[in-house]
Image (cartoon, rainbow, N blue to C red):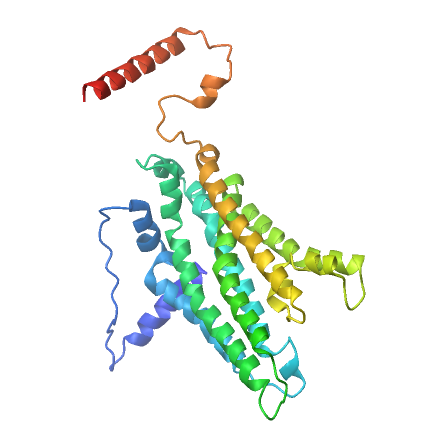
Amino acid sequence: MLKTFKGLDRFFDKANNNRLTKGVVLVRETVGLPYYDPIRWRETSKRSLGTTRYRFRMLILIQAPITFLLLWPTNDHSIYSRFAPAYIASWILWIVAALVISIQATGLIGSERSHQTLDVLLTTPLKSEEIVKQKFAGIWRTIHMLWIPFATVYAFQLWWESWVRTSNYHPRVLSETAILFSAIRAILSVTLYLPTIAWFGFHQGLRRRSQTQAILITMTVISLVCTLPPLIAWALFPEPVPPFWVTAIQFISPAVVLSDVPDTPGHWIFLLLHFLGVGFLYLWLANRSLGIFAKNVGRNDGSDFDEIEADVPSPWSDSPLLRQRRERIGTRLEDDLNSAEVH
């Protein structure tokens, strides 16, 4: 992707240097020095995929084919189908978004390891939680950029369902409840799925030594979550109209949720329960990643002693060096307490 953007740089620079434009640049990126949030500044100003021009070019690469597919002509048979161009565009967009977010999230720590800059990052005088939050600044920018094509796709789908399907030429009246169902599903999916994928990818990037392995595991888990629940439900009850509990199993899959047609009021319950579970998963992954960051990268958050060394007995626990270290720590703590009492 970075090589593609560099090729686009050369193409646009060459095309812009003509007699008419003469190399005019409408928006110049100015990169100063950070007064606060140095890691956030590095993620959004010094990394290629975090800068404004590269995000704009990524938006063009995604938005242009998606818009072309939305405007693709259809016929009388596919206008009622879930395989109409408007719905195929949403599936393609979700696959691309999952890949982009997974690659960027797993690379937050993986790229630091591969470039041998992780030790420098860990010496930054910030708490581990603050380091992670600032590292996520570039991912949040990417997620906000992806909101534009998602808004385009789902706004077109709502227009498609409310106008085209209810027109006089194709008389099929959809209830306002179904359109409201689609709107709520679109908002919740874009709001919750993207950051959940990001935190899960970051979690795998922490635990795996290789970014490639983290990406493969992340995409494999996402694929299994999307495909296994409907396959299990179909194996348990292959009839056209499944019972309540089989439908509940199907709604574990995001793919089923994104393609569901609300035929019964029970689908509202499944929808709300599904996104409630996704919301809890999102919060758990975020808190879990913040909690295990220091442990997985070997950082003690500036504590005066290693908790593992203090809790686990060691055959060298009575060595003179460790006794001197414990005495220095105890003296330092007493001085801090005395100074606090004086103040």
Image coordinates for residue 147, horizontal then vertical, percent: 44, 66
Q: How many marks?
A: 0
On screen, residue 343 above or below 44: above
Identify which residue is drawn at 53% across, 62% down.
Answer: 189
Query: Quadrant location of residue 128?
Result: top left
Identify which residue is drawn at 39% across, 6% down.
Answer: 320
In the image, is 15 to the left or to the right of 280? Answer: left
Depth check: give the residue in front, 178 or 151: 178
Depth check: give the residue in front, 123 or 125: 125
On screen, residue 216 above or below 64: above
* Residue 24 in view in this figure: yes
On screen, residue 86 above or below 334: below
* Residue 65 in view in this figure: no
Residue at the extreme front of the image, as rendered:
265
Depth check: give the residue in front, 269 or 4: 269
Residue at the extreme left of the image, as rendered:
343
Image coordinates for residue 219, horizontal then vertical, percent: 58, 54
Identify which residue is drawn at 53% across, 77% down.
Answer: 158
In the image, is 331 to the left or to the right of 149? Answer: left
On screen, residue 179 above or below 36: below
Image coordinates for residue 53, horizontal then vertical, percent: 34, 65
Image coordinates for residue 249, horizontal then vertical, percent: 70, 56
- On the rendered image, what quadrant is the C terminus found in? top left
Identify which residue is drawn at 38% across, 8% down.
Answer: 323
